[in-house]
Image: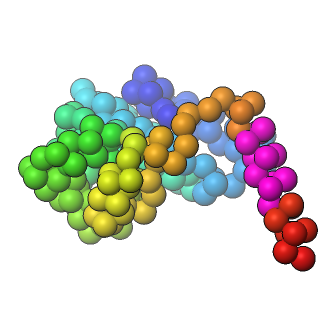
Amino acid sequence: NISPKQMVQASLPNLVSEALGRHKLAGNRLELEVTEGVFLGDNGSTLDVLKRLRALGVGIALDDFGTGYASIGFLRNFRFEKLKIDRSMVVDAGTSTGSLAMMNSSIAVARAMDMAVTAEGVETKAQADMVRIAGCDQIQGWYYYKAITAGEIRAHLDELRQRNLNHKRATG
């Protein structure tokens, strides 16, 4: 996640480039998330920074879309690789036909602009089904797994690997 303050720093693309080199990571293996707020009061420097990051091959996702800072027309300023539908839009779409229409239209615009779409904050099977049917590529939220620390991630992955190994041994 990149903050609006970081986005106006002309040195950000250089810092990202150095980090990619230091960790021997191709630019296309990194996705940075920015919120709609990065364009508020912008004098053009944000767009320049985004273009320079894209030149590194880095993917740029627009996070928390639908939180009220911008309209769909906002997407004309820069084509993001991914649009992340905010949790509030997902929750509201489950109870309001107007919100559902807004979510669906946001997804349709993202598709027309060749952007992937992620639904954030999915907490129920009904929400997961709804965003899947609406055309989201990825779904994030507690319905699938609660937030955990880095140490817990390692333990969880070790447990999954062990289960997979045990399953392979059992099935031959």
Residue at 28% over, 64% down? 134
Q: In this picture, is 115 found above or below 139?
A: below
**Image-based side of 59 in relation to 16, left or right:** left
**Image-based side of 96 in relation to 81, left or right:** left
Is 74 part of what is drawn in magenta? Answer: no
Chief secondary structure of the magenta portion: helix
The extreme left residue here reads 98
Please tell me which residue lies in front, 43 or 80.
Answer: 80
Residue at 77% over, 43% down? 23
Is 155 part of what is drawn in magenta? Answer: yes
Residue at 16% over, 45% down? 95
**Image-based side of 168 in relation to 156, left or right:** right
Whole-percent x, y for residue 65 in the image: 29, 43
Whole-percent x, y for residue 139 in the image: 44, 53
The color scheme shown is rainbow
Residue 95 visible in the picture: yes
Residue at 54% over, 37% down? 146
Q: In this picture, is 97 found above or below 64?
A: below
The extreme bottom residue here reads 172
Displayed quadrant of residue 172: bottom right
Whole-percent x, y for residue 167 in the image: 82, 65
User: In the image, which residues are magenta?
Assistant: 154-164
Displayed quadrant of residue 48: top left
Whole-percent x, y for residue 85 in the image: 32, 47
The extreme top residue here reads 5
How many numbered discs?
A: 0
**Image-based side of 169 in relation to 97, left or right:** right
